[in-house]
Image (cartoon, rainbow, N blue to C red):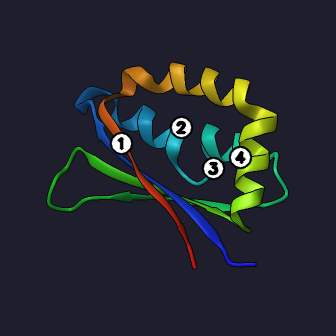
């Protein structure tokens, strides 16, 4: 099995940056939700030095199947948290899923 990562890009509202970091950081609400899966390995929150409002998350999973199983089992909670966090950003984009 090869590690699987899911990468997202976010442009954060300036006044909501502290709240965004709390939700999306390695100990935030997203990591707590993902942590319900034994296949979740951790989250990285990276800040772009050249674009102060741009962030990237890298969610690490044991394999693609672990991620898919999590989404199938916790899809409702995922959608709820996504709705809660919509107001924190001006734009977000899935950059892809990658396996090593």
Image coordinates of residue 12 in percent, x first then y, are 29, 36
Viewer-side label of 1, 2: 1
Quick one: quadrant of the N terminus? bottom right
Q: CA distance from mark 4 to mark 2?
A: 12 Å
Image coordinates of residue 25 in percent, x first then y, are 52, 49
Residue located at (36% from left, 42% from top): 93
Q: CA distance from mark 1 to mark 3?
A: 22 Å
Q: CA distance from mark 1 to mark 2?
A: 17 Å
User: Is the Cβ of the residue at disc 4 closer than 8 Å to that at disc 1?
Assistant: no
In the picture shown, does residue 37 fall above or below 33? below
Q: Which residue, as the protein is rendered here, is positioned at the far right?
A: 38
| Mark sitting earlier along the chain (4/3) | 3
Quickly name the residue at label 3.
Answer: 27
| Mark sitting earlier along the chain (1/3) | 3
Image coordinates of residue 10 in percent, x first then y, are 34, 42
In the picture shown, does residue 30 fall above or below 60? above
**Secondary structure beneath disc 2?**
helix
| Mark sitting earlier along the chain (1/2) | 2
User: Could you classify mark 3 by the number of other residues whose Cα lies within 10 Å: few (under 14), some (14-19), or many (20 or more)?
Assistant: some
Quick one: quadrant of the C terminus? bottom right
Q: CA distance from mark 4 to mark 1?
A: 19 Å
Checking the image for residue 23, the label placed there is 2
User: Could you classify mark 4 by the number of other residues whose Cα lies within 10 Å: few (under 14), some (14-19), or many (20 or more)?
Assistant: many
Quickly name the residue at label 4.
Answer: 34
Taking the image as shown, residue 93 lies to the left or right of residue 65, namely left
């Amino acid at each position: 099995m090869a590690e699987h990562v899911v990468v997202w890009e976010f442009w954060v509202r300036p006044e909501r940056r502290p709240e965004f970091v709390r939700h999306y950081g390695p100990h935030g609400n997203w990591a707590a939700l993902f942590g319900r899966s034994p296949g979740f390995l951790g989250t990285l929150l990276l800040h772009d030095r050249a674009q102060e409002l741009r962030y990237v998350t890298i969610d690490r999973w044991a394999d693609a199947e672990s991620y898919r199983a999590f989404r199938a089992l916790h899809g409702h909670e995922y959608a709820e948290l996504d709705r809660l966090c919509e107001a924190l950003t001006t734009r977000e984009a899935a950059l892809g899923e990658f396996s090593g």
